[in-house]
Amino acid sequence: MTLLRDLDLAGLSPYLIQHRDNPVDWYPWGEEAFAVARRTERPILLSVGYSTCHWCHVMERESFHDEATAGFMNRNFVSVKVDREERPDVDSIYMDAVHAMTGRGGWPMTVFLTPAGEPFFAGTYFPDVDRHGMPSFRRVLEAICHAWAHRRADVQKQATELTRRIGQLLPPADRLPGRGRVVAAYRALAQHFDPEYGGLGGAPKFPQAPTLEFLTRIAGLDWAPEAPTMLATTLRRMALGGIRDHLGGGFARYAVDRVWLVPHFEKMLYDNADLARLYLRAAQVTGETLFRQVAVETIEYMLRDLAHPGGGFFAAEDADSEGVEGKFYVFGHDEFHEVVGRDDGPPAAAYFGVTAEGNFEGLNVLHEAAPAAAVAERFGLAGHEMEATLARAKTRLLARRDTRIRPGLDHKIITAWNGLALRTLAVAGAVLGERRYLDAARANARFVLDVMRRSDGLLARTWSNGLSTVAGFLDDHAAYTLGLLELYQATGEAEWFQAAADIVDLLERHFGGPGGVVLASASGASDLVVRPPDQQDNPSASGASLAAECYLMMGHLTGDFDYHDRFEQILRSGDRLLEAAPSAMGHLLAVLATSQLGYREVAVSGPDALRWAGTLANGYRPNVLVAPATGLEETVPVLRGRYREGETLAYVCERGVCQAPVASVEEMLALL
């Protein structure tokens, strides 16, 4: 039998490597584990997590490292370990089961399956002893064994019924969702908005980037008067809170409180890629300079701490360092003053909220506790003196922090998340006029297309240590297509458009399902009890919503109505969820709202095309696509026949009709 401990390290994700030496006989996900379960008539214990998950580490220390617990698991179960980031389809199927059984979800995820893969009991973290109303993991194992031995028929009936439920697809709507659906969703979100601290609901509080994307795209519309306030309040409070790394840039995954103060310290590529782009767009919408600063600092964090030398981006950094959550990031009162110095210490401590009692287990999560101007007035400092004080403090604190043992790095390169990063770099390069960001975007595109594209044209899900072992999913292909299209708009380099077209044309063939639903895994997937849809954001944008945006953009760049038809199919298939759960459908709402604004294509051809396109990028126009070319370009359909030797002309098109070409930037902007 092939267990995790028998596999080559080069082929394993960091999460599986973390569990490789457990005394548990862990199998990787696959037919061999199911064959053993069928032969021995033992249930499968499926454990799903990811490498930077704090509570996954806790459960491993408490239970999976325990010889007695491991021995019980080995005798009575076939234990399977899955990295949710590597197999989001497996995670999606069984997370649905967890929600159905418990009403909540999270990781580590613990699910008990029949040998056929059907779930019959599920939960998340279980402690090593009964604690806070939770049964111990050992007690759960014993209860499952008893049920399997004495009530197997009931167990099987429950498993079959639950599998039927999680495999059900909602029927598509008869017609496209209209403006009323978007307005109703906005009003529902507004009812759950926290007007004081931003975000939706109370603690714990997540950034929910897809919902913020929706608010960004509708900000300024007359039917969404509170959208700009909801967006700005949330982004401002997050920027001031401890969820943002005020020394090194970047955001933690979520805050454990309502006020964004104490984070769950892991840093994920998808959060930082999405948030950097949102802060940049919000700076354009609101004019707040803080948002632009945060966007730049977040991108610089990605380039400094998450970048692979070949051009890809690593997945995440751990919450723990030396086995302690947050140890890398927090400062004690005395250490803070020792590092910052006697003169700068008091005002810097007042600004960063550093106290003797601390705000996190006796230590301090740095945040903006008071505005710099108020602190300066309190200590009798001029504005420039306060700026210099904080600059010196940050430099010294960062230097001290860099001497500490860093959190673990998840060195997987995940295609979907790299697509988000590519999109952000391309947008930032265009908006900020920063060539370095565009160079990083090009390097990322070359890495993924050269190293992670398979012989059949599909992309791999992950790349690690030179190996791509898992086929890509819907979100990988859709997210990366959007990144390539953004890079094309920023550079005018048609190779990125062609690469995007090649990928998007694979979506329907490999991921299309009944009734216009697009499914998470490719049609060749044979190791799943059901093929799950990918319709709800969790926590980044769903594969379906990303695919919808791909089809929408490609339809306008090519004039091909097949793309528009597929876009509309996804909207109809998601309409019932848009109505029932708008907070889980933020990105599809954003795409739908954008499509209702009246999409426009701007074909710009001639020697000054990139400068004109850069002028367009200076303002946020979510419903405008730009197709620039400095010379003759026939690859992109909207540019065909547009080139005039020595002239720069712009063609503004809407609903398949183009206005007469204009020969100045001012005329182009006037048409928009």
Image: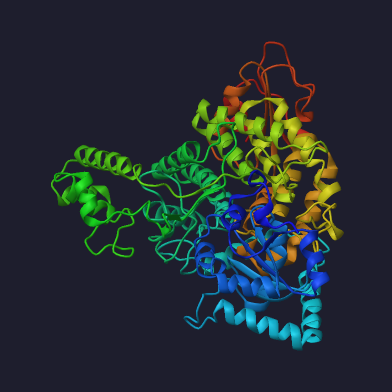
**Residue at the image position 60 percent from the left and 70 percent from the top:** 70
Q: In front: 334, or 165?
A: 334
Q: Position of residue 592 (x, y in %)?
A: 69, 53
Answer with left or right where residue 145 lies relative to residue 410: right
Q: How many marks?
A: 0
Answer with left or right where residue 433 lies relative to residue 545: left
Q: Position of residue 164 (x, y in %)?
A: 81, 73
Answer with left or right where residue 638 lies relative to residue 67: right
The quarter of the rendered structure image containing the C terminus is: top right
Is 413 placed above or below 613 here? below
Q: Quadrant of residue 2?
A: bottom right
The quarter of the rendered structure image containing the N terminus is: bottom right
Q: In front: 522, or 570?
A: 522
**Residue at the image position 29 percent from the left and 60 percent from the top:** 363
Q: Position of residue 483 (x, y in %)?
A: 65, 39
**Residue at the image position 64 percent from the left and 43 percent from the top:** 10
Residue 656: in sight, yes or no? Answer: no
